[in-house]
Image (tube, rainbow, N blue to C red):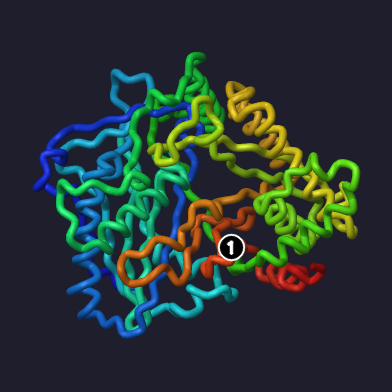
Amino acid sequence: MKIVEVTRVTPSSNSPNSALEFSLPLTFFDIFWFKHPPVERLFFYQLDDLTPARFNSEIVPKLKQSLSLTLLHYLPLAGNLRWPSDSPKPIILYTPNDGVSLTVAESNADFDLLSSNGIYEAAELRPLTPELITSDDSASTIALQVTLFPNKGFCIGITAHHVVLDGQTTTLFFKSWAYICKQGNIYENSPLPPNLTPFFDRSVIKDPNGVDMLYLNQWLAALGSVNSDSNNHKSLKVFPHKAEAPNLVRATVEISREDLKRLRERILPHFSDSAKELHLSTFVLTLAYLTTCIIKARGGDGAGIGFIIDCRSRLNPPVPQNYFGNCNTGTLTMMKARDHLFDENGFVFAVKKVSDTVKESLEKGVLQGIENKLAFLFELGMELWKSGLPIISVAGSPRFEVYGCDFGWGKPLKVVVVSLDSNAISMAESRDGSKGVEVGLALKKHEMDNFSSLFLSDV
């Protein structure tokens, strides 16, 4: 890997908006993720004839210029997370001349392998991923990296601070950047299409009971229990990702629309009297099936299953889909091996477990018990840790439609969530638009071999 340039891209100075200070308060949805490691994604674009000369004279300048224009619409992303001495909680603050860190690099890694569904070492992706700059006093909201693979293509890496952006907002920004880059003739005062224009009004998130400060105090108390340095509780440093295990490998698998149909048909006979009560969405079927295969591949005692429910359309009144920031809630359930996970009904049990968890959240309302949500997840997470059970979590969603991010050189050949450890999977829509699901996962080599022999073998 050769680092060509590390620069800072600021919102276009030709616009008066870039000269204005802009701040956003954090909501309880944001503070829920206070110390969570950043989310990292890579978008691979294939250009077989891409030379270093063309990359440096065409690709990089277009990406820089369009990024500068995009940041005019997303000023908080050019700013930083800060905690003013007179504020009870951190804020997102943009001040004039703030900007986004952009690294330009060149790699001789195997582009074809890294952008395929094949198995490769997880550590291969690390050099392509930008590092988010955080300190006790300040934290960047995003970091970007553009990496050339000569005569193959390039990839764009984005690392996002989870307190500032959820997956929906990260994708909204990336699509806006791609739109402006592809248009080519966008100027400082040009509006984005309504569906790409971020909605910044935080008053739509109601918090009459002060859940924001409750969550913050719970985070600080949890940090204080493991860190005796009481002066450091207000640090804005995030938890780092766990280092990749030496034998951790990655792969991508696909579940087609036909596979999903067969999985659904396999479930229904087991619930002939109560099938209508099941929530047999694509998400539920995919998560239940993948979790069953992973647990069997490991031969462990079970796992916790954690996933995110987007709240935008489920609040009253609903929040716009282009709302900027976090608007989701986490949920966690437990499956143990004794719950028939290793027999032929393991998938049936997993579907019922995930379905019930989703249904309970939706029927009770996503804000039901929100005051106790973080403490509950802390407690259950600790219980799982003490029992030695991993938590299999989910990143991404087919609803994000990440393969629609076309900067003018075609849609991505591959989109990868880098920030997966051996206890996480990612989901995206199938690249070919066939309504299937693309799932990324990282496992130890022998576990991946076991998983590969199990996956779709019984469908």
Left or right, 1 with respect to 340, comes to left
All told, the count of numbered labels is 1
- Please give the name of the residue rendered at 80% of the width and 60% of the height, measured from the top-left corner: 299
Left or right, 14 with respect to 145, comes to left
- Please give the name of the residue rendered at 40% of the width and 37% of the height, measured from the top-left corner: 323
Left or right, 347 with respect to 212, comes to right
Which amino acid type corresponds to the residue marked 1 in the rendered image? Gly
The quarter of the picture where residue 149 lies is bottom left
Residue receiving disc 1: 440
Query: Picture coordinates of residue 305 (x, y %)?
Result: 69, 45
Q: 366 or 61: which is nearer to us?
A: 366
- Please give the name of the residue rendered at 63% of the width and 23% of the height, measured from the top-left corner: 369
Query: Picture coordinates of residue 386 (x, y %)?
Result: 72, 40
The quarter of the picture where residue 448 lies is bottom right
Residue 441 visible to an observer of this rendering: no
The quarter of the picture where residue 233 lies is top left
- Looking at the rendered image, the quarter that the C terminus falls into is bottom right
Crowdedness of circle 1 by 10 Å Cα count: few (<14), some, many (20+)?
Answer: many
Q: 322 or 452: which is nearer to us?
A: 322
- Looking at the rendered image, the quarter that the N terminus falls into is bottom left
Image position of 178 with respect to 359: above or below: below
Query: Picture coordinates of residue 36 (x, y %)?
Result: 49, 41
Image position of 208 with respect to 391: above or below: above
Query: Picture coordinates of residue 83 (x, y %)?
Result: 32, 28
Q: 36 or 265: which is nearer to us?
A: 265
Left or right, 339 with respect to 67, comes to right
Task: Give the structural element (helix, strand or loop) at label 1.
Answer: strand
Residue 36 visible to an observer of this rendering: yes
- Please give the name of the residue rendered at 89% of the width and 51% of the height, measured from the top-left corner: 270
